[in-house]
């Protein structure tokens, strides 16, 4: 009996030690990611470290637009890539007026597939790109079962969420490697943490970005190139407009500007981050439960968001 009690005691101590270690490690990473960049001594001069030009994909709305503004604020010239030329022209003018940097716009639709990268390659030929922000992404219009999602929408998610980041990275890595410096920021999502029913393909595409980033980091270690991937939780953007619960900014659901201001400060400090301190707290407590619990919670949340969307839609339909 005493041996059994002793074994349980040892197991209990080991469990407590593991939990405490995880807590302390998470706290240290949080301090490093979100507190140190606020101290002038630890702040990274992105222009000096990586170069004078940045490319931001999906840059006319949400996180991409806010990221472009923040980089320009730091004196970095911006290449804006998105679908709509009118929006690109407007944002480019705002950036030049506010921050006095150069801009270039490229209007393309990543959902069209491989051929668009020939155009991008030609447009970027003479630009020394120091920072690439792979932000462009597509999500379900609302939480749906797989067979409800239009086939074209599934192809768009694959082409945009996976294809764009992969081929943009392949396009710009050679010049970064030649100069011995550069940064690639892949904007993923906390959806990467577990299977996510009702957002199945979207979440799977974010798992790809996580694995892609981690493998690239090893491939190019020692090259002077930073490979960072961000895993934000909910942000108040048009992408999450399917639920009113996500359309009010708060500490835990920041707007895109607040998120970008925080996230950009982590570049050159940590290779992986949620990008935002409050999301870091949520992230830590999210990964504590086992995978099946996280999947169950994600499924429940998406069913709630689905009801939000469908109830709003039914309320706006005309009565016949």
Image (spheres, rainbow, N blue to C red):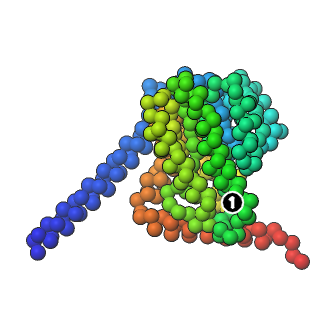
Tell me which residue sits at (43%, 53%) in the image.
284
Tell me which residue sits at (51%, 69%) in the image.
296
**Residue 319 x %, y %:** 87, 76
Tell me which residue sits at (44%, 34%) in the image.
221
Residue ranking furthest to the right: 320
Where is residue 84, by image quadrant?
top right
| 207 to the left or right of 93 | left
Mark 1 falls on what kind of element? helix
The C terminus: image quadrant: bottom right
Nearer to the camera, 99 or 298: 298
Q: Is residue 233 above or below residue 124?
A: below
| 156 to the left or right of 207 | right
**Residue 137 x %, y %:** 66, 49
**Residue 35 x %, y %:** 45, 37
Count the marks: how many? 1
Nearer to the camera, 227 or 39: 227
| 217 to the left or right of 23 | right
Residue ranking furthest to the left: 2
Residue 137 showing in the rendered view: no
Which class describes the residues within 10 Å of circle 1: few (<14), some (14-19), or many (20+)?
Answer: some
Tell me which residue sits at (47%, 53%) in the image.
283
Q: Which residue is mark 1?
A: 154
Residue 6 showing in the rendered view: yes
**Residue 223 x %, y %:** 47, 29
Nearer to the camera, 107 or 177: 177
Nearer to the camera, 14 or 207: 207
The N terminus: image quadrant: bottom left
């Amino acid at each position: 009996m005493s041996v059994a009690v002793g074994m349980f005691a040892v197991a209990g101590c080991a469990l407590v030690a593991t939990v405490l270690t995880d807590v302390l490690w998470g706290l240290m990473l949080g301090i490093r990611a979100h507190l140190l960049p606020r101290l002038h001594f630890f702040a990274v001069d992105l222009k000096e470290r990586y170069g004078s030009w940045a490319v931001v994909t999906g840059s006319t709305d949400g996180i991409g637009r806010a990221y472009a503004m923040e980089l320009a604020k730091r004196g970095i010239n911006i290449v804006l890539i998105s679908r709509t030329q009118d929006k690109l022209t407007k944002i480019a003018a705002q950036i030049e007026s506010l921050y006095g940097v150069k801009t270039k716009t490229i209007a393309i639709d990543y959902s069209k597939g491989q051929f668009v990268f020939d155009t991008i390659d030609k447009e970027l030929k003479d630009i020394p790109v120091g920072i690439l922000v792979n932000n462009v992404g597509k999500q379900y219009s609302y939480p749906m079962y797989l067979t409800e999602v239009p086939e074209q929408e599934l192809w768009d998610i694959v082409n945009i969420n996976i294809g764009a980041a992969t081929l943009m990275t392949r396009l710009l890595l050679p010049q970064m490697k030649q100069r011995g410096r550069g940064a690639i920021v892949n904007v993923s999502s906390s959806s990467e943490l577990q299977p996510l029913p009702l957002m199945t393909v979207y979440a799977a595409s974010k798992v790809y970005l996580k694995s892609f980033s981690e493998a690239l980091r090893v491939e190019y270690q020692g090259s002077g190139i930073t490979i960072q991937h961000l895993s934000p939780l909910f942000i108040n953007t048009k992408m999450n407009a399917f639920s009113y619960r996500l359309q009010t900014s708060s500490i835990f659901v920041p707007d895109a500007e607040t998120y970008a201001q925080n996230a950009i400060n982590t570049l050159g400090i940590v290779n992986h981050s949620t990008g935002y301190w409050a999301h870091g707290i949520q992230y830590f407590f999210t990964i504590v439960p086992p995978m099946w619990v996280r999947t169950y919670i994600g499924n429940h949340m998406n069913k709630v968001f689905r009801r939000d969307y469908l109830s709003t839609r039914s309320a706006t339909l005309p009565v016949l």
